[in-house]
Image: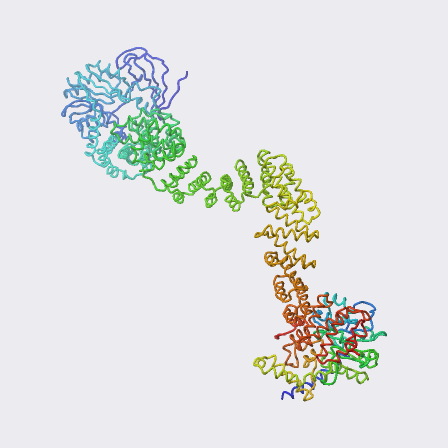
């Protein structure tokens, strides 16, 4: 195995021994023999090459150099390189010297000797700190410096036997001296002489046990100090050597990397009050600083150390005093403002020690670190101290750099740097920096002891809210059990871990463990704060679980940890409030929503939140189908008002719940309006509408259901729907159609409906029956054909089948073939009244369809006429009327009239309307047939007149006309004619027919020489006469002739008479060719014309007329011939 | 002053305007026929009516169709001559059911231009032609059968018959109805007159040269001209008895106040005044009432439309037609709706 060379400093390389031995003599105990080589040191400062091998004494264990070249401590070199400044300001480990001194119980005024004390800090502490007196010996120029600067009695010389004459000393101090001596036993013996009988020797020296390959280079270097340290003691070797020198009582303590040895000829007791010692020390430093000049190294050294130590001990007052002393010193000597400086003076980096000493206090790192710790202790913002820590590190680095140029290093600075770096990381963590976690992880992995720093970082990160970073840190280093941490940190760590667990994504359940771990830290039941914190964690964890819908866990926790009691205790705190809300969440989710109002009582909560919870409770009640309670809830808590004020989503949910309630136990009709302002997705809206419709139908609210269909296109909704609601809606529509709706749509509704065939057929039959009942015969016919209703009816049988058969018969009667009725009702039991009625209906139907032959045959086949004698009911009444019609149509007027009279007698007071018409019709027929006597029998006693008013207009007109015609007959009442004519005209009869009747009446009256009565008709006759155009029909001719005759009766109208006769005669002339026989009216008309002309003294015209026509036409009356002659 | 101005204007008209119009008439083509129906040779019977018509829209009134139908039913063949330049299809269809021929010509030459064109075009009189009646559309009616009128045309008593005669300007038969018997048709005078008719664009000239000049020419040619309703007979109807009746009617308050009554009296007085002063009246205007009461079957359209001679008693024409003639005034009233401006029927 080849030994590896390791560089541990700029000029120093080492090779660890591999167990090889060399013969040697131990300078400490004198044992000779093979000694194991510990380490080989190759030291090459710029001006020399030195090689040392440290060997281990097999007897006492001391490590000693094989090459005892003793350094000349008397040279000025150290001064030249600025060592003294360093030493005064920083390098002198005053505490390592002072600390052991504080244990020595010697009174004020005791005599003290310090050997190799260089500056004499130990002596100074003894004199200034403990009130002792004494002097010191040290060969180095530093001693002169110290003597001058500190004002001490120090001889720049080695202490020798010659100096023993000063008398025995109570306290002899030799710190870090014996390692420099080639033959320690001689020195120990000399010391035995210097120490009084009750005196005590105090030594400090590096602990050689530390020199192992595991030690870091920075720590190894000061231990080895090649060329300076010649014999390095272990506790054992030192104790051996001291006893060997005559000290009966020896106590060696290993403190850090040093050995502290107390030795006395007499028994002694050490005062182990560290705190008191530290306080003493701090007081010394600060007080000592005040005694120095501001710009002096001592001021910087004492005040700097004072600050550092006080700050580390969290002793605020001396720290502040020290800081107060440092500020003017730095200002006076370097022009630096320690309060504000943000960077090192220019050139500090890379400067040599003396150059650096001119730029800044060499202990600036220590000062700034101390200041940072001081501020930290004052609970200043840690994250804000990061620049100060970093500046401290820079200052430390500058010093270490300067020292390193001389292959030296400063242990304190190294420590400060390490601590400061850690503090920086914690600062970063406190600031929530992302880089904190990885750096702390790296640190802790590199130096497991720094795991505590990681814990602090964890606390910082959590406090800074960087849960992700904290989680990374926690997970990487498995920071879960802080039991081993100091109490404060443990508490913080537990709180932080709990916070992490409570954070989103955190392992909520672990929070309970942390809460439990927190309790024992508290200082008994009175430590309310921590106890509350633990309770808070439990409550918060419970809240998290509830809010994260982890209801089972939440319920378990609620029971196990009596959360409700905790929450009650924490009523004034957010955690208690939140937990009570979370309890309500549980009620809403998995508990009883009805509990909510009770739980809300006494809970200080924003009204909006309270109302939201009440609404939620309502919604859950509905959701749990607890409709009765939900209705009560609406009443008790005015849910509509709550909903009106709620957030949109909740409002919508409440409205939907209200709709569900409507659907379940309320009024489904309210659903559309409630849906009104709701932003519901269309499919849901439509489903709700359909549901409402279905409920309406199921509740048999058919009218409402129809109204619903009118307002909402239910068919379209159902078409778009799917699943159960589609089926329900389809069935509901069908039921509705069957119950009250359109039966024609039943088949379409049945399409695609999963429904049993028998039920389908029953529905079809019902639909058909209803179609018929609605008189929708056209649709019924198509329906019957499409769905083979006849066959279905036969197949179904029973009441439904019979009803369907009856419906088919009814349809036949109404719109089909009445002749089919007998076939339809063949299935009905004999004597079935409905069948008999239908048969009569068939008879009536055939008559009405003018199928008289078939009607007659049906009547004969089924003995209808005899039945009509006794049958009652509407069908019989109709059939009797039909029988009348049939008789009329087949020319059996007498039979018809007899039937009419029979029906009239039967009906007595309540003659059917149809009878009125038939009665009048019979009368009209008789008149038209010229059977006036028979007509008069019918019209006797106003029987026709009475019925006229109840007849349809056309028949009434015919009736009036018939009356008129009747009166025109011989024996008629002429005087009635004008009035009858007025009635006819007023009845709306066609103008020509009125004119015809008027002409007939007019002619009758004129012919009867009833001229005044005829004249009364003129207003009606005249306009018609005026409008007459040839050729004239018989009525017109008669009317014209009558008009001429009438005009002839009045002198003023003779001219008119001429004109009228002329028109008639001219028209007749045009009809008859010359030589023939003219119309019978021709000669009378001509006669009238001639008569009128004569009366007008127009004899010539009259003569000319006669002359014109007598030769032309045959058959001229004699009187005219005579007149012409 | 005004009279002198009028005299001057008349001087200008007859010395400058009319000669220019005559010149135009001479220069114009004599025939203005645009189309004839039926095409080709038109067979005609013995007794013809040349029925002259004008309507700017090419419409033929229902009453004119009734007029023609009555003529046709009395054995006359109708040749319809229109100056409208066009006929509406429905009019043409109706005419084709009634007429032997339909001639459409430009609106040039007034009635006499139209008749002359027809006579020339149809080659009248033909060998078998016994009667030609010239008729125009200037009357409402017939309100009484035309048969009696036609039967009274006795060509043994006169070769040429009119329905009315006028003494205004010069004695003449009024040209709305002129009937020519066989002798007249074959007279040289007839041929000469119609050979000289020119399409002169001046109504005054047409009236003077043709309407008035025609009777004069015929009479001078030895043809007898007579009217069925003689002027003298009509005048006599307005006798003292008539006046007496009107004065009696004034005995009542109503009679004195009734404007109809007043206007009738005024007209009677006016007629008797004319008789007394031997002023010639226009029978179809001034004597319309007397004509109707005597069996005259027409009312002149001009009377109801323009009443140019300001006849006083025309207000009750409807009543006369309806009550006395028992005839329907509605067709006339319907026509008047499209004719009258700012005047009631």
Colour approach in the figure: rainbow
Q: Is residue A1117 left or right of residue A42?
A: right
| Nearer the observer, A991 or A564 | A991
Q: Position of residue A357 (x, y in %)?
A: 28, 34
Q: Position of residue A949 (x, y in %)?
A: 59, 58
| Nearer the observer, A48 or A750 | A750
Q: Position of residue A740 (x, y in %)?
A: 54, 43
| Nearer the observer, A895 or A346 | A895
Q: Quadrant of residue A209?
A: top left
Quadrant assignment for the C terminus of chain A: bottom right
Q: Quadrant of residue A963?
A: bottom right
In the picture shown, does residue A778 fall above or below A405?
below
Q: Residue at x 74, y 85 (%)?
A: B170
| Nearer the observer, B26 or B297 | B297
In the picture shown, does residue B105 fall above or below A711?
below
Q: In the rendered image, is residue A585 in sight?
A: yes
Q: Is residue A628 left or right of residue A891?
A: left
Quadrant assignment for the N terminus of chain A: top left
Q: In the rendered image, is residue B20 in sight?
A: no
Q: Quadrant of residue B160?
A: bottom right
Q: Position of residue A1044 (x, y in %)?
A: 70, 72
């Amino acid at each position: 195995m080849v030994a590896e060379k390791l560089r541990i400093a700029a000029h120093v390389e080492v090779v660890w021994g591999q167990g090889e031995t060399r013969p040697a003599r131990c300078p400490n105990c004198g044992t000779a023999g093979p000694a194991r080589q510990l380490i080989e040191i190759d030291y090459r400062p710029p001006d020399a090459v030195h090689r040392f091998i440290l060997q281990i004494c097999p007897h006492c264990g001391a490590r000693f150099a094989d090459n005892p070249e003793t350094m000349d401590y008397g040279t000025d070199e150290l001064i030249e390189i600025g060592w003294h400044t360093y030493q005064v300001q920083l390098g002198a480990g005053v505490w390592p010297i002072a600390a052991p001194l504080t244990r020595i119980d010697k009174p004020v005024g005791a005599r003290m000797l310090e050997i190799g004390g260089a500056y004499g800090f130990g002596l100074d502490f003894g004199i200034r700190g403990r009130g002792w007196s004494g002097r010191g010996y040290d060969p180095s120029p530093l001693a002169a410096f110290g003597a001058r600067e500190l004002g001490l009695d120090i001889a720049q010389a080695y202490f020798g036997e010659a100096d023993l004459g000063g008398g025995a000393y109570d306290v002899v101090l030799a710190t870090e001296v014996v390692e420099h001596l080639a033959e320690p036993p001689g020195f120990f013996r000399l010391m035995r002489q210097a120490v009084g009988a009750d005196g005590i020797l105090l030594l400090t020296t590096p602990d050689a046990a530390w020199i192992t390959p595991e030690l870091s280079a920075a720590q190894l270097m000061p231990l080895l100090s090649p060329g300076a340290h010649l014999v390095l003691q272990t506790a054992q070797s030192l104790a051996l050597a001291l006893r060997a020198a005559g000290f009966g009582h020896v106590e060696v303590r290993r403190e850090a990397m040093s050995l502290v040895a107390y030795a006395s000829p007499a028994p002694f007791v050490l005062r182990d009050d560290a705190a008191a010692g530290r306080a003493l020390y701090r007081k010394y430093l600060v007080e000592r600083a005040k005694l120095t000049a501001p710009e002096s190294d001592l001021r910087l050294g004492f005040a700097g150390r004072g600050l550092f130590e006080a700050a580390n001990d969290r002793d605020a007052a001396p720290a502040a005093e020290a800081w107060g002393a440092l500020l003017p010193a730095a200002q006076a000597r370097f022009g630096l403002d320690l309060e504000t400086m943000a960077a090192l003076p220019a050139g500090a980096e890379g400067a040599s020690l003396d150059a650096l000493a001119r730029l800044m206090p060499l202990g600036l790192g220590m000062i700034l670190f101390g200041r940072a710790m001081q501020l930290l202790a004052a609970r200043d913002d840690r994250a804000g101290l990061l620049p100060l820590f970093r500046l401290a590190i820079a200052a430390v680095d500058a010093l270490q750099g300067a020292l390193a140029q001389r292959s030296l290093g400063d242990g304190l600075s190294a420590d400060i740097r390490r601590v400061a770096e850690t503090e920086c990381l914690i600062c970063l963590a406190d600031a929530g920096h992302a880089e904190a976690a990885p750096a702390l992880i790296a640190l802790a992995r590199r130096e497991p002891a720094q795991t505590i720093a990681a814990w602090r970082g964890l606390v910082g990160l959590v406090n800074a809210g960087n849960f992700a970073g904290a989680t990374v840190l926690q997970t990487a280093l498995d920071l879960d059990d802080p039991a081993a941490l100091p109490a404060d940190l443990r508490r913080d760590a537990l709180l932080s871990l709990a916070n992490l667990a409570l954070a989103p994504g955190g392992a909520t359940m672990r929070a309970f463990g942390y809460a439990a771990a927190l309790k024992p830290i508290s200082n008994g039941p009175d430590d309310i704060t921590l106890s509350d914190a633990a309770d808070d964690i439990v409550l918060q964890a419970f809240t998290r679980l509830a809010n994260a819908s982890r209801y089972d866990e939440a319920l378990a926790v609620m029971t196990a940890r009596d959360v409700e009691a905790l929450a009650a205790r924490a009523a004034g705190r957010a955690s208690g409030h939140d937990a009570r809300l979370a309890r309500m969440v549980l009620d809403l989710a998995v508990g009883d929503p009805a509990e909510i109002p009770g739980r809300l009582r006494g809970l200080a909560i924003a009204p909006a939140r309270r109302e939201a919870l009440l609404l939620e409770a309502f919604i859950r009640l509905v959701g749990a189908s607890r409709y009765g309670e939900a209705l009560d809830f609406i009443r008790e808590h005015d849910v509509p008002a709550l909903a009106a004020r709620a957030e949109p989503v909740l409002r919508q949910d409440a409205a939907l719940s209200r709709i569900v309630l409507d659907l379940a136990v309320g009024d489904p009709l309210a659903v559309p309006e409630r849906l009104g302002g709701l932003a519901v997705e269309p499919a849901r809206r439509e489903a709700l509408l359909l549901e409402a419709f279905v409920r309406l139908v199921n509740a048999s609210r058919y009218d409402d259901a129809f109204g619903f269909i009118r307002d909402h296109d239910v068919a379209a909704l159902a078409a778009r729907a799917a699943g159960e609601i589609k089926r329900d809606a389809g069935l509901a529509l069908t039921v509705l159609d069957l119950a009250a709706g359109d039966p024609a749509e039943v088949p379409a509704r049945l399409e695609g409906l999963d429904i049993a065939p028998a039920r389908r057929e029953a529905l079809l039959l019902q639909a058909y029956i209803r179609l018929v009942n609605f008189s929708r015969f056209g649709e019924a016919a198509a329906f019957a054909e499409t769905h083979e209703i006849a066959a279905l009816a036969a197949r179904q049988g029973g009441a439904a089948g019979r009803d369907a058969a009856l419906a088919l018969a009814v349809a036949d009667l109404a719109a089909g073939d009445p002749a089919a009725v007998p076939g339809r009702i063949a299935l009905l039991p004999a004597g079935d009244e409905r069948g008999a009625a239908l048969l009569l209906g068939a008879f009536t139907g055939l008559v009405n369809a003018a199928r008289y032959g078939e009607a007659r045959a049906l009547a004969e086949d089924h003995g209808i006429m005899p039945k009509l004698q006794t049958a009652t009911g509407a069908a019989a009444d109709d059939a009797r009327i039909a029988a009348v019609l049939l008789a009329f149509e087949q020319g059996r007027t007498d039979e018809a009239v007899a039937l009419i009279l029979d029906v009239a007698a039967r009906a007595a007071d309540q003659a059917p309307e149809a009878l009125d018409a038939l009665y009048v019709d019979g009368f009209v027929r008789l008149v038209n047939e010229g059977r006036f006597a028979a007509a008069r029998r019918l019209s006797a006693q106003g029987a026709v007149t009475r019925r006229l008013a109840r007849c349809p207009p056309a028949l009434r007109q015919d009736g009036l006309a018939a009356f008129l015609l009747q009166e025109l007959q011989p024996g008629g009442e002429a005087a009635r004619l004008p009035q009858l004519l007025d009635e006819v005209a007023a009845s709306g009869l066609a103008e020509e027919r009125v004119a015809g009747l008027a002409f007939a009446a007019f002619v009758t009256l004129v012919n009867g020489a009833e001229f005044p009565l005829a004249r009364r008709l003129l207003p009606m006759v005249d306009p018609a006469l005026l409008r007459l155009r040839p050729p004239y029909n018989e009525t017109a001719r008669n009317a014209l002739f009558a008009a001429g005759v009438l005009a002839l009766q009045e002198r003023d109208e003779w001219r008119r008479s001429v004109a009228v006769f002329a028109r008639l005669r001219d028209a007749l002339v045009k009809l008859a060719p010359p030589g023939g026989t003219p119309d019978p009216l021709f000669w009378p008309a001509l006669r009238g014309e001639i008569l009128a002309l004569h009366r007008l003294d127009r004899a010539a015209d009259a003569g000319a007329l006669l002359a014109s026509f007598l030769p032309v036409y045959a058959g001229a009356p004699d009187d005219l011939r005579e007149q012409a002659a | 002053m005004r009279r002198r101005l009028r005299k001057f204007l008349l001087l200008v008209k007859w010395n400058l305007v009319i000669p220019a119009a005559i010149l135009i008439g001479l220069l114009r083509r004599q025939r203005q026929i645009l189309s004839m129906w039926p095409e080709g040779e038109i067979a005609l019977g013995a007794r013809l009516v040349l029925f002259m018509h004008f309507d700017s829209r090419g419409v033929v009134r229902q009453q004119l169709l009734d007029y023609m139908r009555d003529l046709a039913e009395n054995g006359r063949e109708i040749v319809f001559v229109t100056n409208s330049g066009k006929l509406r299809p429905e009019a043409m269809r109706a005419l084709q059911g009634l007429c032997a021929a339909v001639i459409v010509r430009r609106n040039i030459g007034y009635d006499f231009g139209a008749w002359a064109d027809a006579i020339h075009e149809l080659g009248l009189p033909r060998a078998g032609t016994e009667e030609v009646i010239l008729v125009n559309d200037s009357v409402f009616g017939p309100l009484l059968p035309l048969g009696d009128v036609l039967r009274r045309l006795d060509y043994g008593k006169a070769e040429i018959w009119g329905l009315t005669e006028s003494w205004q300007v010069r004695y003449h038969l009024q040209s709305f109805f002129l009937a020519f018997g066989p002798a007249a048709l074959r007279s040289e005078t007839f041929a000469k007159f119609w050979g000289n008719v020119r399409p002169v664009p001046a109504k005054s000239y047409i009236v003077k040269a043709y309407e008035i000049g025609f009777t004069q020419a015929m009479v001078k040619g030895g043809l007898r001209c007579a009217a069925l309703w003689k002027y003298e007979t009509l005048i006599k109807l307005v006798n003292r008895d008539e006046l007496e009746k009107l004065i009696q009617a004034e005995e009542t308050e109503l009679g004195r106040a009734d404007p109809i009554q007043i206007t009738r009296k005024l007209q009677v007085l006016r007629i008797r005044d004319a008789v007394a002063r031997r002023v010639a009246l226009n029978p179809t205007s001034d004597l319309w009432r007397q004509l109707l009461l005597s069996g005259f079957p027409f009312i002149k359209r001009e009377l109801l439309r323009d009443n140019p001679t300001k006849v006083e008693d025309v207000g009750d024409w409807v009543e006369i037609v309806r009550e006395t003639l028992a005839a329907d005034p509605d067709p006339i009233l319907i026509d008047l709706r499209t004719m009258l401006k700012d005047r009631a029927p």
